[in-house]
Image: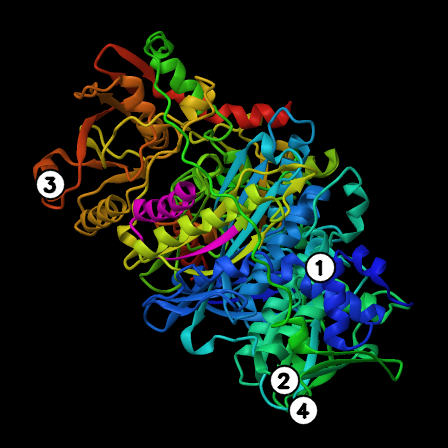
Amino acid sequence: MKSSVITFPGSNCDRDIDVALKKFGFKNKMIWHDDTELPKSDLVVLPGGFSYGDYLRCGSMASKSKIMKSVLNFANSGGMVMGICNGFQILVEAGLLPGVLLRNKYLKFICKNIFVKINNKHNNYFKNIDNDVLEFHIAHNEGNYFCTSDQLKEIEDNEQIAINYCDKEGVIEDQFNPNGSIKNIAGILNKEKNILGMMPHPERMIDPYLSGEDGSLFFNNLINNLK
Amino acid sequence: MIVNEQIAIDHGLKKDEYAKICELLKRNPNITELGIFSAMWNEHCSYKSSRLHLKKLPTKGKQVIQGPGENAGVIDIGDDDAIVFKIESHNHPSFIEPYQGAATGVGGIMRDVFTMGARPIANLNSIHFGSPQHKKTRNLLRGVVSGIGGYGNCMGVPTIAGQTSFDSSYNGNILVNAMTLGLVKKDKIFYSKAAGLNKPVIYVGSKTGRDGIHGASMASAIFDEKIEEKKPTVQVGDPFTEKLLLEACLELMAGDSIIAIQDMGAAGLTSSSIEMASKGNLGIEINLNKVPCRETKMTPYEIMLSESQERMLIVLENGKEEQAKKIFDKWNLDFAVIGKTTKSKKIELYFDNKQVANIPINTLVEKSPMYDRNWKKAKLPKKNKVKKEDINNLKIIDVLKKILSNPNVCSKEWIWQQYDHTVMSDTIQKPGGDAGVVRVHGTNKAVAASVDSSAVYCWAHPLTGGKQVVCESFRNLISVGAKPVAITNCLNFGSPENEVNMGEFVECVQGISEASEYLKFPVVSGNVSFYNQTKEEGIKPTPSIGGVGLIKDYKKMITMDFKEVDNIVLVIGKTEGHIDQSLFARNILDEKNGPPPEINLFNEKNNGETLLKLIENDYIKSAHDVSLGGIITAISKMCIKGNKGINLKKPKFLINEIEYFFGEDQGRYIIEINKNNLKKVTEYLNKNAVHYDELGTINENQLYIDDKTKVAIDELKTSNTSWLTNYINK
């Protein structure tokens, strides 16, 4: 399986995702934002970080990078595109996913382990995962997902909510919402389910000495789904 | 502008210093030259009050590749890998503008590390605030924490450990010390020594603005009520540009075109160009019209003294300019050839085709003033006798809860959750333990780091306090299973012109020297911050020690959380019940006098090395050093972290239970072992003459003392975790 990770100026989780993808069997290539052509890929990842410093709205400058034209074409033709953290913000700014990501409710950067409940398993990202709840890790300042009530109805009707913040048992309540996201949304899909944007960083959970191993579960499953 | 003595005094120079400048130049300086002298001769850059004493610090060791004098220290961790590290203060700016002050402190120290070719792999910090009741404290805390996070998070470097304290002596002068560790291959270390004639001098990074002019001079002065006016001297950080600068520099460093490189930190272009020339015994010529400027009509004076961030100066090999420029173009950074090295041994500056400065380099460096300041030796205070009636009525659990919720002991989760501590995916011990630990990417090795200070002990008796901080750093590294290798120090003191403050400095340095010499734990880098003083009042002497240790096999790392019910808990090291200057004496008895606990260096070394052997042989399940709040505080934290309880026995000895549990004797660790190994472990401790007491057995979730007194661990956890969040949300 071939993957491509886009490095924008200010990306800082690009190495981590590169390590994770390779560990689970992807042949990964790093692609510079100024390039115009995407190599043949089964998966494209937009990594976390602070692209262009996030001085304007997070992700907005990166969404206009040269390479994004190819990413858009790839996504619109059904290619798998995953945005993690800043990558999620870029996907939203590029119009590939609905809604926006606002500043965290308590106006603080948050770095900690959280739990998410998988809401939709009918897609290549979460299909065949036995668990309903995963322990993931977040590290962000702007992860407060928001959309209009019309948009919300639409993404609910189309089953686009991928994962919601919850507790260990999978209970989705306000108290387990780290950043104020509407409906505890931690990640969403597009209508066709080939594009995923999520705030948690599975690439930081890929061995028992790190924050946990549910990232291993996620990537192992992902590559098997793509085979 | 004609320079006179008054203008020199306004630049922070003394009368006799100005006279010396005129004598060295054999003429009066012009305003640009005066600015350069004032920047190079101030305390922050010249170390004029401290140089004499810093020479005493042991700086050599088997694993030391580079000691003090470079941008950062370097140690050898085997397999051609080296760790570059340093701690630095950003105290004065952080008080005036907490977010930017702290942020640029973090940015500055990371630049020091990647200037040497190392990719930063971990950040730490030591931050000290005034009394929680003081009206400024809450906002300063919020601002500093978000500033540290704002910069480090954007750079993608994990913040893995730190220390936060509150004490009224910091009411008018907070401390913000930032430390960075970087990883480099031994043969790819870059230095700041220029070499060769007519080599191009290159400016890269951000453009130069008017921010931070005289920042270093500000850090060399006492605060007064007009300090808010100094806001414009605080630099503004741009972590995004620094991230680009980091990647661009590392890309350039992969080749062989750099002769010397130096970041523009305090005193900006002035100190960076002069240091490179001075180390290479060369001259340097700069055309200031070539310096990329952010603002129009900047004068030579402003260009030379600006402390705009995220800039570097490089001496390149001839003919490599185009190749280097390509890299900086790729990263959208400025790149300008601004001058060349010369044989004149002078700094010569040109602006609009006119020479605007011409100063022999040695007058700025070797001939800068050095003072042997007067200092007063501190007496060891007399011991207090603990009055039985004061402690007999105390309920031990009530005291314990008070101590666990004390601002200096309580959980700092609210702080470190705002720092990205997991980016780079190698953090295997997060903040909240004895030391942070990161793996050396792609190897079995890991590096442990901690930062410590004990202002109360240093204030009570500087010599003992100085030793204690080094020992505490040593213990923190050993507690996670790391072999201590070297330290960096950030020496925060009041005014060197006050003989009591100067005495504190001299004796703390003496204490640090003795301990680091004995423990073979040399000092490889550091900085001095004097004048942490508002009018007459100086801070408590606060040397911060950043310790770095090596774990050869990261799978053997130890954490402090209790692991398993029925395991046995021991304290190693002798408990005498030293109460003076303990958290208990100061906060429960309200007794602020008396000596700090004594340091026995033999025991420190022996206890620590013995514990390391036990860890190597897999006997230790968890470990934690005993510090503030004594044995029972240490144990409570291990219970809270591991979600376990303990059945504690009363001490057998002729010692009061309060003194036993809350005393702060040094050189002690709490360890957890499997009961089947008790005999082997105690035999080994006996063989090595390490004292130990058996404290008790781990249970599910209660802390018992002799079956009579008990408390649920959840209750202790609430005491420990609620203070800071309640305080900040008030």
Disc with the residue nearer the chain's start (3 vs 4): 4
The amino acid sitting under disc 1 is: Ser
Q: Tag 4: Cα neighbours inside 10 Å, few (<14), some, or many (≥20)?
A: some
- Picture quarter containing residue A67? bottom right
Q: How is the image coloured?
A: rainbow
Which residues are the magenta region? B463-490
Disc with the residue nearer the chain's start (3 vs 2): 2
Q: Are marks 4 and 2 in contact (CB under 8 Å)?
A: no
Q: Nearer the viewer, residue B375 or B243?
A: B375
Q: Main secondary structure of the magenta part?
A: helix
Tag nearer the camera, 2 or 1: 2
Q: Nearer the viewer, residue B354 or B161?
A: B354
Tag nearer the camera, 4 or 2: 2
- Chain to which the residue tagged by mark 4 belongs: B
Q: Which mark is residue B198?
A: 4
Q: Which mark is residue A78?
A: none
Helix, strand or loop status at disc 4: loop
Q: CA distance from mark 2 to mark 1?
A: 48 Å
Quickly name the residue at label 3: B686
Location of the C terminus of chain B (image quadrant): top right
Q: Are marks 3 and 2 in contact (CB under 8 Å)?
A: no
- Chain to which the residue tagged by mark 2 belongs: B
Would you say residue A62 sits in the magenta stretch? no
Q: CA distance from mark 4 to mark 2?
A: 10 Å
Residue B401 screen position, x and y as percent: 42, 19
Q: CA distance from mark 3 to mark 4?
A: 66 Å
Residue B530 screen position, x and y as percent: 61, 49
Helix, strand or loop status at disc 2: loop
Quickly name the residue at label 2: B282
The amino acid sitting under disc 2 is: Leu
Quickly name the residue at label 1: A63
Q: Tag 3: Cα neighbours inside 10 Å, few (<14), some, or many (≥20)?
A: few
